[in-house]
Amino acid sequence: MLRNEHILAHVNRGRVVPHRLSADDGRVTEVAERLIACYESHREGPRSRLERELALLEEELGPRLDARRGFKVVRALGKLLQDRAEWAPPTSADPYHVRTRLFELAAQMPEFPAEKPDLLQSPTREDVISRVSRETGLEDPVQVMYADRQKAQILRQFERPTPEELISRYNLAQVQGVLYSARELVVDLGREADAELIFRYAKLMELIYRIELTGSGYRLCLDGPLSLFGPVRKYGLRIAKFVPGLMLTQPWSLSAGVLWRGREAVLELDSETSGLTSHYRRPGDEPGDEVRRAFRKAWERSRDTGGWELESGAGIIPLPGLRTALVPDFSLLNRETGELAHLEILGFWTERHLIDRAAQIREAGERGARVLVAAPEGLGATPEALDAALGKEVIWYKTRLDPRAVLENL
Amino acid sequence: MFSGILFRSVIRLAYESGTLVATGPERPPEPFVWDERTEQWRAPASAYRETVLRLRRENIPHRDAAAAFGRLRLESRIALEPRPYQVEALRAWRAAGLRGVIVLPTGAGKTAVAVEAIGRVGRSALVVVPTLALLKQWYSVLHDAFGESVEVGLLGGGYHQVTPLTVTTYDSAYIHAERYGDRFAFVVYDEVHHLPAPKNRVISQMLLAPYALGLTATPERPDGEHRLLPELVGEVVYRRSPEELAGRYLAPYELVRIPVELTAAERVEYAQADAVYRDFLAKHRLSVRSPEDWQRFILVAATSHSGGREALLAARRRREIVQSAYRKGATLETLLKRHWSDRTIVFTKSVDEVYALSQRFLIPGITYETLARERKDILDRFREGRYRAIIASDVLNEGVDVPEANVGILLAGSASPREYVQRLGRILRPREGKRAILYELVTTATGEEFTARRRREVRF
């Protein structure tokens, strides 16, 4: 993440445009390469030397990118590289002990320990140092006395990115930086978006949402508990951390009211044109995904579904009390009667996950939603326990879920 | 059956992320509002005091599941004889319901008032301070006072340990208060004029703390937002000006200005660098009188193709010559020698200079980098006389307490009058028969001379 001092943007007709770099620009990739190489070449070297080198690079490379703001861009890239570095102390001696002895002994001298010896044989600085040297076995205690300063640390680990990765991270980090001052985030989600993933990140960042149906999907407004009493910018950092999660899916568009250089402005982005890539890791296949795919295929092949149709986009059942929403695996609509039902397929999850999900399904039921639950046989919980937790009967399946078993329960 | 009915008509209060949530069949009193997002009645956590008082007054049955604070047995280890005005200040604060702001000049012992208040309230307390230096100072003071009864916690500046007696910064409280806002019955805002800043206001909203104390020498803010203080902490309950306490409680001092001349070699080098720098300024019709002018110079120099880089280097070299002027070090050595039996604090602006001089003269250095424990350790030894001199960068500003110093040496400082006044305040500690001296070393033939003159114009 970048700090406020690294954030660059401009405002155009009330819209804030975060600074971005193009990986197609040769000058940009060269700067990125030089910075990465600089870090690489300072492995096992002290931090102060690396920082001096980076300061020089700021002056040298900055103007090549942008006459006025180039040095800031270079500094921001440097900060993102710093996030990938690990540091270690340079000595096994205890600098605190060494300097404390130096100070104590110096202060015990009846007169100030002078730098140079004089005719009166007054105590000297050298007297103090050689005594500490004898005590500690260190050749030069003064050299070691501040070895625990951050500047003296050694670059131990560096997770090297490619120039393109660094540039991509920079572009997203600038967007995040603009969001630090956001009051709220409004996200429009298309039906194909993975809403469950989004609610997972919203909950992880402890954001509160409001949800509305729109013509093409859903609109989420995200902010925090205190936002109720008037605009606060306190949740901007969490919003900034939420956004890379949102970017793992699509389609979406977002807008946020931010403060840029003391002026209100709006940040607007959408998945189609943003050109941004999330650095969060996409969660892998969930257990049960195979079952879901097979179920859809089997459903599509079924001859008689009694008027029930499998909806393409997932439904969202808001659960305000639980600070989340249930996004069932499938929604089923009966064209004739207009009845709507949902189907949730449980997988071999952790117990915690299972308990959470059971609570959500029960809450959804209490709010009037009809949710059928299917679970694989051999799931940790006993059928009775699961029935009790969910407050309803479960459709059990062995390896695949038969559409007929579902239809029987509808 | 009966108890079931009774239970159902009870209003239950809970703390949730910086807010107060009420559940029950009845509508809770103002300022609770219905939160449609989560379907709950919600109020800012700061409504706790008024809400509970009102529920009690109107005999409305309620259950308080919000407060997670408890009593603390705090016995101060340091026997302090409070000064009369400190006693008055505390009395006024108690009369106002253990809420309000106390205004005392720098050096009048605001910290001692707070320590006394924390002991009297005897509940878990949070102390909010503006800087990391103050964070460490408060840690040290509270540890000395209550270390035997309770562990002192720190939140901010790399520390994240929350105990029933915790010190934090405004910045960290802004981020974390919503997580710990239910744990403290009492909040002390040091330098409380920082609280009404738009960002910091939220902190008091997130805290349940029914008791609050604000401390400052100057509650007024240029933006006028101090009008919010009564709502955030309480009214000003006690106020004394420096004039009212001068002489008796604030020690007089003597100011000695020592011009430091560059050596012949330094003068030549300085003149060369200065010529390159000034030529560039003249060529580009620039003049440098303010920080903004300096920014403009950097900008022009960084983008100029002819001589820009040289001008930047020359400007830097010019500064370095002054910073590390040989005679400055030699003068400092003379002063340290002369005051070896006193308690001397050397101030400088530059962190690197602190470490360089600490290594050169073998006196302990304190900067923002110094950890809380080591800082306390150094100041304790300094107080006990085991260290005769210390050198510190700006960290000793704004209310940081150094009780035993009677000699100050100011190496190079900015021209901020407030900063200057407060630095002087450090040394103006009452001590019987103490005569404080403040030396100011100013390298001549440089801009620092002007800075020093401007500073001396400040009257107080």
Image (cartoon, coloured by chain):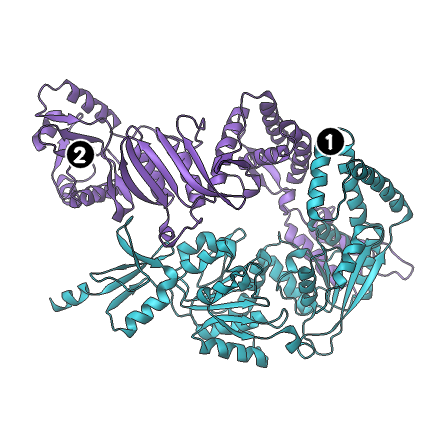
Chain colours: A purple, B cyan
Element class at badge 1: loop
Horizontal side of A250 relative to B375 (left or right) equals left
Q: Position of residue A363 (x, y in %)?
A: 20, 45
The answer to whether residue A353 is visible is no
Inspect this view and state whether residue B211 appears.
yes
Query: Is A360 in front, or is A151?
Result: A360
Packing grade of label 2 (10 A; few <14, some 14-19, many >=20) is many
Q: Residue at x 38, y 51 (%)?
A: A227
Residue of label 1: B304
Using the rendered view, name the quadrant where residue A383 is placed: top left
Disc marking residue A342: 2
Please state if B377 lies on the left or on the right of A392 as rendered: right
Q: Amino acid at mark 2?
A: His
Coordinates of residue A256 in the picture (x, y in percent)? 42, 40
Q: Residue at 29%, 41% (x, y): give it.
A: A211
Q: Eyeballing the image, is B260 above or below B380? A: above
Chain holding disc 2: A
Q: Residue furthest front?
A: A13
In the structure shown, which secondary structural element does the residue marked by tag 2 occupy?
strand
Chain for mark 1? B
Q: Out of B449 and B401, give the one closest to the viewer.
A: B449
Q: Tell me the quarter of the image containing the C terminus of chain B.
A: bottom right
